[in-house]
Amino acid sequence: MILQALTAYYKTLADKGEISPPGWGLVNVSFVLCINDSGALERVISVQSEQPRGKKMVLAPKSILLPAPVKRSSGVSANFLCDNSSYLLGIDSKGKPERALECFHASKNLHLALLEGMDSPAACAVTSFFQTWQPEQAQNVPALSDHLDEILAGGNLIFRYGGQDVHCDPLIRQAWENHYNTQTDGIQMVCLVTGAYGPVEPVHPSIKNVQGAQSSGAALVSFNAPSFCSYGKEQNLNAPTSKYAAFAYTTALNHLLADRDHVYRMGDTTVVCWARGGGSAYQALFGGACFGSPLSYTANDLQSIVKKLCQGESVLYDETKLDPNMEFYVLGLAPNAARLSVRFFLRNTFGGFLRHIQAHQQRLEIIRPASDKFDAIPIWKLLDETVNQNARDKSPSPILSGEVFRSVLTDTRYPATLLNGVTLRIRAEHRVTRGRAAIVKAYYLQNPNSDVPKEVLTVSLNPDSTHIPYNLGRLFSVLEAIQSAANPGINATIKDKYFNSASATPAHVFPVLLNLAQKHLKKLDGGLRTYYDKELTQLMSKLGEAYPTRLNLPQQGAFQLGYYHQTQARFEKKEEK
């Protein structure tokens, strides 16, 4: 299904002229070899430009549409009109001159076979270059001297003749396309993508720009061991894909991954999305709704747009009419050595995905501190709530990231590991943040539990709730407030010492805390003491005659929500004053 969806997307983009045609692809180029009529190298020009990478500027190659490069393994295989120094100059810095010569001769044979005898000055110049170039004398060529070290360090080279890049010559382009389209050697089988019978591609082009994968690219479809193969088939003949389909799906996926504005990260997972009918507006709105990516719309405008789409109405967004019934895809890829692992692949209508995201955000909705600038909590921030921010590796669990993302977009149960991760962080840090409280609330709304009734799963404080664990959490917050009022500027409160035990074994802890609170109340003036006495009396009346001996995990979640709600209600009152 993934290959079919990507191939269909390629066709959509190709029909609009927004993607390279078969036989062509974007290649990173560092240098241009300028040659004259006789094929002599006159000079070398760098086409690299400074681009930001992290906190510094680095030289980056230029991306140019060129004849599609071959997929190399360990053998010698030349590219047409664009390659590294081993193939175009016969030199390298790896200390393997014999292999460099072998690469040069392979490139020479390819170019002579395609260009020799053509009625094109540019083609004649290239053939003359290969016929006269002597790799053993390359380091003595004056035109190479200024850039020799950089060329040997790596990077692709192209030819330029008469002020024009050779690959732009119409006759040469036609020669390449004829060559590409007539390569029908190899085994013929039924393509699993198109269903057509014809030659299949034994090795598919590489996928680039996946975080953590090899910079040279990784394979989405690959078989390299006998245990993966069947019926005596080798390589990708185990998943027969036609030449066109292999080119189409890899080109479409590389096109998506190269669009940095619409590529999203979750842990080690790289996420791309696309609409079957094309159009970046779908991707941008999805990124804003799901990942909190910056948009040119206000939060209220975005909510209004999403609401209309969820109701099945078409909406004009960035001068594009968005159809809620448009088929939409989300693909998550993770690195796995020289290959890619599919973390998830989800398909739905665009409006269907937005409805699930909206339902998720409604479950997460909870009173927020004034210091929290997020109107809605994006998925990446939720996952951060499960991570120790003092650890060297602050990445959330890759498996958890995929499970949470899938549960959000399919509107199914949240994974238990999400709640467990948040619970561990609360126990370790004794902090119930907005994100953690929101996760607890959303988890039990989506995964109902009788020990956490809906009366406690509210956006803000529910003063009428009679649920004992919830009110114990509220009581703990009031006791902490009394201690802080009695000891202004205190560095550590009862939360740092007693929060975990109070939420797990309240019968052992609360008598101690209430006794401590009586001592703190004596330090307060009359009005404040009366206020807190009243608060304590109201809460104690909801707890019955005895404290619970033990609270289970769901009940501890209710305790955490009660604590968070009561604390935020107190802060709200301070802000109003």
Image (spheres, rainbow, N blue to C red):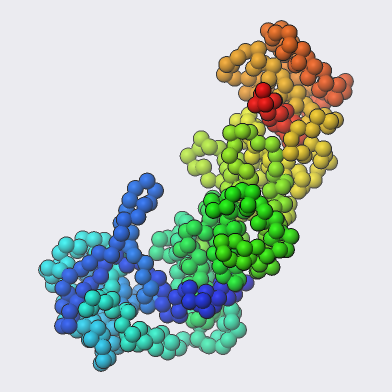
Left or right: 502 as drawn, with respect to 119:
right
Question: Residue 149 falls in which quadrant of the image?
Answer: bottom left
**Residue displayed at 26% across by 85% down:** 123
Residue 261, percent from left and from top: 49, 58
Q: Quick check: 435 above or below 63? A: above
Q: Is residue 101 visible?
A: no
Q: Is residue 65 visible?
A: yes
**Residue displayed at 79% across by 33% down:** 462
Q: Quadrant of the N terminus?
A: bottom right
Q: How many marks?
A: 0
Looking at the picture, tell me which residue is in the foreground, 225 or 43. Answer: 43
Residue 59, percent from left and from top: 30, 56
Looking at the picture, tell me which residue is in the foreground, 440 or 136. Answer: 440
Q: Quick check: 153 above or below 564? A: below
Looking at the picture, tell me which residue is in the foreground, 121 or 492. Answer: 121
Left or right: 488 as drawn, with respect to 552:
left
Q: Quick check: 570 above or below 191? A: above
Question: Residue 564 falls in which quadrant of the image?
Answer: top right
